[in-house]
Amino acid sequence: MEILQTKETIEQKMEKTHDSIDEDFPPTANSLYNTINTKLSKKELETWQNFEWRRPHEIFQGKFCLFSDSIDPCDIKQGCLGNCYFLSAISAMAEFPNQVKKIFLHKEINEDGIYAVNFTLGGENYTVLVDDHIPYYVKKNKPAFSQSKGKELWVMLLEKAWAKVNGNYENSIKGFVSEAFRALTGAPVVFFKHMYIQDIWEEISEADMNKYIICASSGEGQLNKERYDEMGLISEHAYSVIAATEVDTAKGRERLLKLRNPWGHKEWKGKWSDNDESWTDELRKALGCQEINDGVFFMCVEDYLSYFRTTVICKLHEDFVSHSIRCKHNTGDYNLIKITIEDEGKIFFTVSQLNQRWARRHNEYEPSFVRMLLSRVVPEDEDDSEDFPLEYIEGKCWKDEDTTIECYCIPGEYLAYIEIYWFDDTQFNDLVFRTYSEIAPIIEEIDKDEYPNFLSETLKTCARNSSVVKTYADKGEPDIFRSFSITESKAEYGFLYYENNSAGTILREIVKFSELENLQILPPYSGEMVEVKVPPGMNEIIVLNRDDRGCSFNSTYYTALIKPVEETLKVITERGKRKQIEYNDEKYEVYYYTYKDGSGYLWYFENRSDELDDKQAYIFEGTFYFKLENLEIDSDEYRDKQEWKVTLKPGETSYVKFLLKDVTKSWGYKYSYSFKVKEAVLNNSKLIDKVKEFGKRKQISYKDEKVDVFYYIYFINERYIWYYENLTDKKFRATFNFELTNLKIDREEEKDEEDGEEEGWKILLLPGETCIKSISRIDQKCESKYRSSYSYRLSANDDE
């Protein structure tokens, strides 16, 4: 068989065809049946072997034509070929005569007897040449197979073209209306099994309103062939559905379907049949019901569902065109197709694979599961384009010759993600991507690296609109949510999506999957335990791959909400557990609060000794020793330690955060502490007052001579404070030398050069001046002591 695609090659082929014979499908026995391994019965084979090939002028007396003035669905008569599925399709198409004529390249009789027929096979448009030699049943003096009631050729030629692409007439026996519709129209076809759909009436009535072509297949189900025959129906037979109507009757509202048997006779005998008493004259006239055996009848939708097992809808649009590309596809990989749409409107996106009919030599071949996801590339000037660059449009997973997504698209760029799990990866691994719309878009296969995160980015926008959403309002965060679904993508991809719209809280969650059946977690995540961390303003998604439509799993969630410390500190003194520092029944105005949230604990300290009116303020120095279970200190300095040190001056506060390590395990702590308090001197003025009030006062003297220069020594906060005051009217110069044990002299950063390097200091006081010096203890746990000596001079001026 030769299939031609361009007008030029068609014309060339027609010119080369001589004697009205198509050499690729000649009028021989091989074009009728399989001469080897035929499946015809012995009786059928004997009959077929006696068929002759005749041309139209040998069949009809007088003038004949390709089409008569009108194409009538009732004109089609089936012969002795079991192809009612095909005849039912063309009978249904005959409701739209212009569409039938579009199938033929030329609309008039060809003197050479060669005709060109347009078919869509495997998603691509082809033109098939046939000659006008028709099998003829000599014994009955009529064409052997299908024909029209008049002297028209179109039915016989269509049937022959279909036989040619099948290899012969025998191979065209039995099939599906859906494949006939696809071949004849190139339009998308949807197929409904009545046992799997709740309301087929809605689908049929909408299709009828859109003037789509509809067919139905009868089936035995719980009814036997005798029951079908009793009711005037044929089991395992295809019928056209030509109208859907709701009518008001005395018994209430009825939903009626108008059907046609392609045989042109043998009709339904049940309720609403031609001579049923349910009809009124008014209804008969309104719906055009005639009491003639022409194969056309009415039945209610309830009986339709009882006697018919499937409905097929061909979504043919008279002004639509198709455009396709062929791609290579390997199992485990995927294709990415870019579609550029210039005008808004309805558009169909279809992935086609080889039909079983064209793989006759491979008996085990069957169509494979196709997964398709469609998304829109969000322009940069649209809101959220940076966070959500791809907008989910639709998804589909289907096992058939065609997998189609139908949607209404605005202008822009779209991406189609296609994945196929071939049952036979060695023989047939091509796919055809096809669009069907009023204006053909630009389609091209692109490098997957252009959109390396297509799957996750597309599913994010699907997840944002999920019907299964859980917020964390019960944990105080209504602006954080997750959504989970294994069905809403419609392409057998599940998702667990997180979005954090909070002001500052970090979401940390571990999901423990168990008993995963036919589900896989896709990279970058893996394993049965997955941890996500979602900062404010961010989102994250875990993608699940369904290996089979039957899948199951269990999941457990372990959640930690890490709130900003500033936010927790606002409420910790109200909600936290408060404790006061004490020792030997003596309490200090130092408090600490512990507050537990989903991420661990926060400890908050405050020194309130500055609020005391009648007591000394003090500095608090504490060391807390912890035994942590599944917790760690949130500090680089203390992260690997089990203790924490804190120093608080009066009025100061501090905090430490304990973070949960593993949210799936229990957590807690034990602790103890040691501390000391120091008197706090808030400024030098108060320090001097304290030193003069409580310090040891000494007067400068030599032998028994005393001078009015005094110094005070007072030990406070691990330091010896020395305070000097000159009450004379002279300059006072002195050098103090020390022998220090576990002590050191406190020197300012810019050390007085006169002090030198020795353990001591020098002072110079003018009349009325004072100064302060100090010595600090080195190791608070060890004994400290000192011895001192001094020399001094009083002078009236520097020259003395």
Image (cartoon, grey):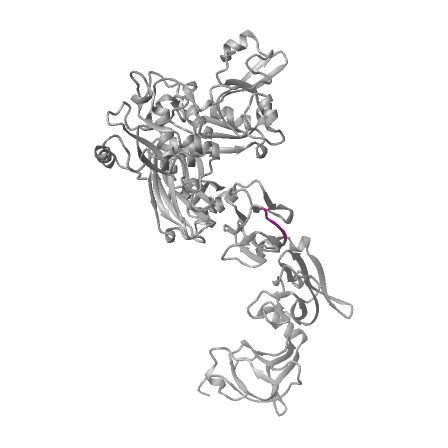
Q: Work out which residue is located at the far top of the displayed protein and give it.
A: 281
**Dominant secondary structure (helix, strand or loop) of the stretch shown in magenta:** strand
- The answer to whether residue 304 is above or below residue 736 is above
* x, y percent for residue 752: 47, 81
- The answer to whether residue 1 is above or below residue 246 is below
Answer with the quarter of the image where residue 590 lies.
Answer: bottom right
Q: Is residue 554 magenta?
A: yes
Q: Which residues are magenta?
A: 550-555
- Nearer-the-camera pick, 470 or 298: 298
Q: Is residue 776 magenta?
A: no
* x, y percent for residue 543: 52, 51
- Nearer-the-camera pick, 631 or 167: 167
- Nearer-the-camera pick, 602 or 322: 322
Answer with the quarter of the image where residue 23 lies.
Answer: top left
**Is residue 628 visible in this depiction of the protein?**
yes
- The answer to whether residue 705 is above or below residue 224 is below
Query: What's the residue at 52%, 19% (across, down)?
Result: 266
Query: What's the residue at 42%, 37% (across, down)?
Result: 171
Q: Work out which residue is located at the far right of the displayed protein and give it.
A: 585
User: Would you say 410 lies left or right of 578 here?
Assistant: left
